[in-house]
Amino acid sequence: MIRRFALLALLMTGTASAAVTVTDDAGRVVTLKAPAHRIVSLAPNITDALFAAGAGAYVVGTSRFSDHPAEAKKVTIVGDATMIDLERIVGLKPDVIVVWRSGTPAAQVEKLSRLGIPIFYSETTRLADVAPATRRFGTLAGTQEQADRNAAAFDASLARLRSDYAGKARLKVFYQIWDRPLMTIGRAQIIDDALDLCGGDNIFADLSQAAPTVTREAVLARDPDVIIGGDGGRDALASWRQSGFLRAVKHDNVITIDAPTLALPSASILASVDLLCHTLDEARARNQH
């Protein structure tokens, strides 16, 4: 009987510390000796995704502006999109560092690689990427059950939104993310995908950059049905209302929305996508009058 319990304990120990292997978004196979229970995240969306995967308790370091979920604000900050505190990261003794592939400067990644700590690349750019990323993080951290459950819930909510807005009249949309200089979204930004789901056509979807700079003349020439901007604390859209010949102005569709997670390619984006869809629905109604 004692031998049987000893064997059971050995088997349980072996399972808990079993190696994990996950392919990251750079196509690299990352193998850890055991599930990662000390994780450094180098992007706000990665932090949010790790919490959604049930690995929030294992996140020991984050990047600046990791505000979602609220619990993430309590985690030690180790840098931002331009600068990383290597000494602080080493002091945290992470099992793995999760890097935003296109958002972390190559020079910083090169310095990280010299630390000898496993690096996992993440690159979530479309809504359909969110649930698979959540599942991969669940595998990485050994929290697969919760990750699968939350990923399935995200996919179900996303499917409902797609169904609700399928077949809606399409609207040409200019989405302004900054006014000085004038910046918008290209097709590489997840907001472009959210607009499409809601029945909106990004007028600058032909631009490959995530956040291209455009001219006022280019916007006027494309004459959007709707102009949308985030809540930046002042009316950055005010100048558009002076262009009375624009369709968006004629139908009172120059709109500021408070959707702080709309650019966050992770689980917390859904509430903002829902708000965006409702906003475009209201714009459709005004277009019909």
Image (cartoon, helix red, strand yellow):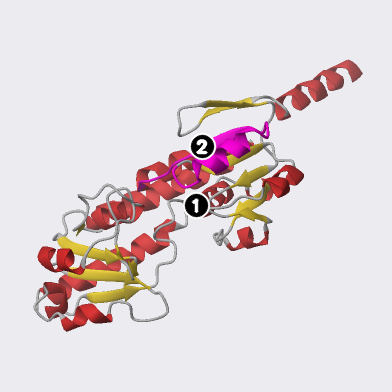
Which of marks 2 and 1 precedes in the sequence? 1
Q: Residue at x 45, y 34 (%)?
A: 25
Q: Badge 1: few (under 14), some or many (20 or more) residues near its Cα, within 10 Å?
A: many
Judging depth in this view, the residue of 59 and 279 nearest the camera is 59
Q: Which mark is residue 182?
A: none
Q: Position of residue 166 (x, y in %)?
A: 20, 53
Q: Is residue 191 magenta?
A: no
Residue 288 found in image quarter: bottom left
| Amino acid type for the residue under numbered disc 1 | Asn
The residue indicated by pointer 1 is 45
Judging depth in this view, the residue of 222 and 111 nearest the camera is 111
- The CA span between labels 1 and 2 is 13 Å
Contact check, label 1 and label 2, Cβ < 8 Å: no
Q: Residue furthest top?
A: 3
Can residue 63 be seen here? yes
Q: Position of residue 160 (x, y in %)?
A: 32, 53
The residue indicated by pointer 2 is 121
Q: Badge 2: few (under 14), some or many (20 or more) residues near its Cα, within 10 Å?
A: many
Judging depth in this view, the residue of 85 and 144 nearest the camera is 85
In this picture, is 79 found above or below 248?
A: above
Foreground tag (1 vs 2): 2
In this picture, is 116 found above or below 155?
A: above
Secondary structure at numbered mark 1: helix
Secondary structure at numbered mark 2: strand
Q: Is residue 111 magenta?
A: yes
Q: Residue at x 76, y 21 (%)?
A: 11
| Amino acid type for the residue under numbered disc 2 | Tyr
Q: Quadrant of the N terminus?
A: top right
Q: Residue furthest front?
A: 107
Q: Residue furthest right?
A: 2
